[in-house]
Structures are given as structure tokens and as C-alpha cells.
Image (cartoon, coloured by chain):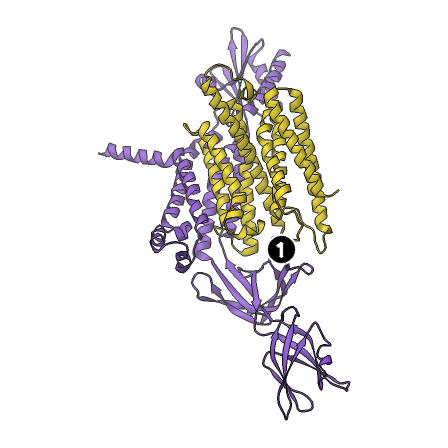
Chain colours: A yellow, B purple
Amino acid sequence: MNSGQLFNLVTIGYFSAMVLFIGYLATRSSVIATLATVLAYLGFAIQTVAIGLRWYETYQVPGGAGYAPLSNLYESVVFFSWTILLIYLLIDLKYKQRSVGAFVLPFAFLAMTWAQLRLDSTISPLVPALQSNWLTYHVITCFLGYAAFAVACGVSIMYLIKIGKENKSSDAPAGGLVGIMPSAKILDDLNYKAIMIGFPLLSLGIITGAAWANYAWGTYWSWDPKETWSLIVWFIYAAFLHARITRGWAGRKAAILSIVGFAATIFCYLGVNLLLAGLHSYGA
Amino acid sequence: MRAKQRGFLNSAWDFFCSLKLTIFSLIALAVTSIIGTVIQQNLSRQEYLRVFSEKTYRTLDQLQFFDMYHSWWFIGLLVLFCINLICCSIKRFPRVWRMVHNPMLVPSEQVLKTFSNVDEQLVAGEIKGLTQRMQGFLGNQFSAPQVTEQDGSVYLYAEKSKYARFGVYITHLSILIIFLGAIIGNVYGFKGFVNIPEGGETNKIWLRNSQASLPLDFTLRCEDFSVSFYGNSQRPKEYRSVLTVIDQGQTMIDHRPTIVNDPLSYKGLTFYQSSYGAAGDEVVSIKVKLRGEDKVDAFSLQRGQMVDLPNGDRLRLADFTPTFRNFGPAARIDVLPHSGEARAVTVFKNFPDFDNERGGAYIFTMINFDQRYYTGLQVTKDPGVWVVWLGCALMVIGCLVAFFMSHRRLWVVLSGQDGKVGVRLVGSAHRNQPAFELYFDELKNKFREELSDS
């Protein structure tokens, strides 16, 4: 059994959980919701083991000195889906809003599918620039932040659907898919809570990146595209945090900012590597 | 006129304090920042003309899009952002300071009515005894209260994490501190580079932006440079310079290995391993054996160098290449007999018997060759960097305080009502209301229990 096979199992697990969560929206059966949640936990547990196994495998390749498996695109995408599940399960433990799973699990499933089908999973030992403990701190903080934003994005989409439906059908109670969703107030609160977790983590991710750059190259900020995009993401979520307490910006506009913020996050993570040149291009 | 002026000043002040301006400047910074990630920054005119037409180039240049992060309009946006930040904080901070240092010990009836977390019980007993019980109750459940008597009523006030209210201001201040650090670095610091060949030394560096050199008051020597690879692959494993610092004749740092991610610092300057290259010619070691004799001579030669062989013939390294087609390192040697014509011989490091099989009077073999490298070091001095880290630390602390802590306040008001005592419990949190509501509901039950025992 190698880590690649385990990651395939994880992908299947997340796919099933996703389908069941969507099924829950349609059927409102709490049995299905529980089953979906159990599958999500199971997939998360297997993924944790698989990442550990891949870490072990980095010591086994010829000439490999071993490294935390966070160094290339494949490893980061896998880690991203792991962090999405981590943040989602934490929020699930606290708020038990099962319908959120239908809007968050797809991100984790898509990430795993892309990694398993399209990305190069070869274990290659670290080039000199990456041989630093800062790599681990930087990647972990950034991706936990990204994952919190993914959850916030899922919740914001739910929010927009919810208020869209509620406005149309005025005071008649909304049924079907929307009826089972938490109220707009709870969704707005969840959105804020997720960003509240993500924003300090993103800040810390940018700071550890700056510290590392300063240690490796002697400059903590050089307006490299990746750095700039992380700052753009930071600006958007800072705007979100202030929008929530501003009249006329709370609610709908804040939810849109949260979605735009996640789109910028994805561009910062993938778009910069795939489309623009810069210091992080080895990540691709 | 004066009233008009004041009106204008007031509305200007309100403008700079407004949250709408905050949202505008944050979004404007986010959107404009994209430009510099799409158009590569600080290239030469020729490089831009390969992409843009002359006209587009001139327009973009005038808009300062080629160095946009230092353009007047981007810096202007950052200044606007900072002014907004400062004004907001100046406007709100004094009120928060007063709230923290002069808490409302005796809230008016109106104020109490604004709080949604309330519970009221009417119990038999005396105010004095009940005050003591409530004092104990708050002390056990929450925190020790302050007791104030006024107009026959008794007010108990207790609070927790009052400094949570400062989280936002710590975060705002941290941004200003980071900017301050960046300014200090720009004014008093510099970035430069220096290339030192192996065995060579330097006491000056080159500045990045001005092409001028800067003298050092010490000497930096490169003892050795090496590159290593993983196995037989082309994937680099380590770039390593061994550096020595000599200050006023004294060796201050001796043979310090300096690799990527492990720079060398001395006297406020930091040297980073950043590049390398070949410095001058390779040195080739060649063995010469006269056919039929046991004696072997060895020479180390650079390209073009000539040496005398014992019997009066001469030998010159005509050419060398580290890779000759697929055959690896190869050298061409000219043999110049003291009488007669020169002959050219080729030797390969990977095929030591090749020259032997030629059957000439001399047998040449290449033992090895040595490439001298120079190491490329990035040099920086940034006295502002610690200010930046201070700002970063404050930002993280400020965010955590602002997001995860909340100033919670409880009042217990006791007042006589028709021979009985009305006991009111009121609570408020400055953020995270849902969590506080849950907490208050639990507290309410304990509060009722406490009073029902009397």
C-alpha cells in the first residue's frame, strides 16, 4: 500500500460524502446527513495517514533526505483539500449545520481529483531554496487560511441563494433545498466566523513568507506576483471585515466580497504559478 | 464664513474617518495592485518595446505602470489608507479608553434597557445581605465586582478581558509600524551584490540600484565554493560558499559555510548565497610517461600554458573542454619536440588508455581537471527589518485579540420594592453575541438557583 493508493481512496470517500450531502439537501433525511459526515471524517482520517505515509516515503527515495510533503503543486493541492476538511469538520463540530457540507466538500473533492488525475506525484528531493523549516510554517499557515476562505465561500454562496429565494417568495416559508439551509443570519455569522479564522492565518502566512524571503534572499518584500496577490487577498478580506460593520455593505455585498476573496485566493494559489512568472514558479 | 469653514472641516474630518473610505481604499489597493503582476516591472525600454507599441509604451510609462508600486498614485493610495486608519483610530480610541478605565459603575435605567441579556427576580430579604451574596456569586462565577451605592440602590459591576477592546487599535497601529519599518529600511538600508572568485577576497560591494560601489570596512574572503547534486541527476542539492571575514588584520569569522537559507551576518550586513559561475580557466592535471620507462611526470596546466619535459621536449595545453560530445572531459595537447614538428594529441579523462593505444613515444593521461568558481553573494543592510517584525507580531496579536476575545460586563442591581428586593442581572459583550447569549442563559439559571436558596 503506498500513499498514492490511499489518496485514491480519499478521493472516493470525499466524492461519496459530497453526493450524500447533496442527497441530504434533497431528501432532508438525517440518516443520510450522518452517513455523509461519517464518510467525511473517514476520508479525513485516511488522508491524514496518507500524508504521513508520503512523508515517510520521502525518506525512502534514493538520495532523499526526507521532507514535509508540502513542496510541489501535487503535494500542496492534496494538503489544501486536507485543510478544507479540517476547517469544515471543526465548524461542523461546533455548529452542526450539515447542509454546509454540500457546498464545501466539492472543493475538497475537486482538489483531490485534480491532484490524482493530472498532477505529477513524483517525490523529488528539495532544491536548495526550499530547504528550510520556514517552508513548513509558511505552507501550513497559508493553506489553513485558504481552507477557511473556501468554507466561507461555500457559505456565502448558500447565503446568496437563501436571500435570493427569500426575497422572491416574500413571507411564505421557503421549502426544498433552501428550506433546509440555516437562516441567513446564521449563514452570515458562519461566513464571518470562517473569515475570522482565515484572516489571522493568512496574515501569519504572509508574515512567515516574508520572514523566509528575508532569511533566504535578504528582502522581506519584493512585489513578486505571488506576494502581491497574497496582499490583494488580504486587502479584500480586510475590506470584508470592515464591510460587515458598515451600513449598506453588510449582508449581500459582504457575501459577494467573500466570494471574490476566494476567487482571488485561488488565483493567488494557482493562477500566479500557472500564468505569471516569479519566485514561486518552481511550485508548478 | 467661520461656520462654513467649520462645516467644511467637519465634513472633511468625517470623510477621512469614514468606514466607506476604508472599504474604498482597500478595494482600490487590491484592484490597482493587479497591474504590477500582469505587466512585468522594471524592465528596460527595449524589453517593453518588444511587447508594446511605441505609443502604448509611452502612455504606460507616463502612468508609471512599469514601476507602479513606487508610483505617485499607488503611494498616494497607501497614504490615504494610512490617514484613514489614523483618523478612525483618533476618533474612536478616546471613547474606548474611557470605557476601559472609567467603567459605567452606575448605569442609568435607560442604558440598562438597551441590553438584551437581562434577568430580574423579586426576593424576600435585606439589600445588605443580598449584596454580599451577589458579591460572592459574581466573584465565583465571573470576576470580583465593584460595589456602588446610590439612591438606596446597590450596583455591582464586574468585567472580564476589558483590554479586548484594544485589539482593533493594536492591529491598526501594527500596520503603521510595518510602514515605518519599510521607510527606515528604504532610507538607511541598501541592497547590493558581490562576486568573489574562490581564494579571492574583496572589501567592496556593488549597489543594486546605482551601479556604484560601496567600500566595506572589513575584508570578505571566499575560501571555497561547491555545487552538489542529488545522485546523478541535474537537481541541485546544495550551493555552498566557505567564507572568512577579516577585520583589521584579525580573522573574525573563520571558514563559515554559507548556503542558501543560511546567510552570514557581520556588522549589520548580511551575505546571502545567490548565484555562482565559472571564474577563469580550468586547471587540468596531466600525467606523462615515456614509453618503456617507469618514471611518470605530472603537470597541472591552464589553457595555453607550456612546460618543459625532462628530455628537452616541450608540452602545451592547447585546449580543454569539460564535455566533448558524449565523451566527457577532453584536452588537446601539443607536443613540441626540441627538433622537428609539433604534434597534437587528444586525451579523454573517461578513457585513460586511449593515448596508450595510439602508440606514440609519450603516453598522456588526463587525471583530473578543476574548475575555479566565483560565488555570487547578495548583500543587504536593513536596519528597519526589526521594526517590521515588531509590526508583524503586533498584527497577529491584535487580530487574535480583536477576533477571539470579547469585553464582557455584568451588572447586578439591587433595589427595594414594596418590602422585597428586586435583583436584576444584566450582561453585555462587545462582540460575539451568540456565544455570550449562551453563556448568559447558563449564568441566569445559576443566578436563580442562588436566589431561590434564600
The residue positioned farthest toward the front in the image shown: B358
Q: Pointer 1: what residue? A: A127
Mark 1 secondary-structure assignment: loop
Q: Is residue A184 above or below residue A55?
A: above
Q: Position of residue A64 (x, y in %)?
A: 70, 54
State which quadrant residue B320 falls in: bottom right
Q: Looking at the picture, which amino acid does disc 1 mark?
A: Val
- Name the quarter where the C terminus of chain B is drawn: top right
State which quadrant residue B14 falls in: top left
Q: Position of residue A151 (x, y in %)?
A: 56, 32
Kindly identify the residue that appears in the image at 52 percent across and 61 percent down: B379
Residue A62 visible in this rendered orientation of the protein: yes
Q: From the viewer's side, name the closer residue of B216 and A17.
A: A17
Q: Is residue B429 left or right of residue B225?
A: left
- Name the quarter where the N terminus of chain B is drawn: top left
Q: Is residue B56 left or right of residue B106?
A: left
Q: How many marks?
A: 1
Which chain is home to disc 1?
A: A
Q: From the viewer's side, name the closer residue of A137 and A14.
A: A14
State which quadrant residue A104 falls in: top right
Q: Is residue B190 left or right of residue B357?
A: left
The residue positioned farthest toward the top in the image shown: B418
Q: Is residue A52 above or below residue B266?
A: above
Kindly identify the residue that appears in the image at 62 percent across and 17 percent down: B446
Q: Is residue B378 above or below residue A73?
A: below
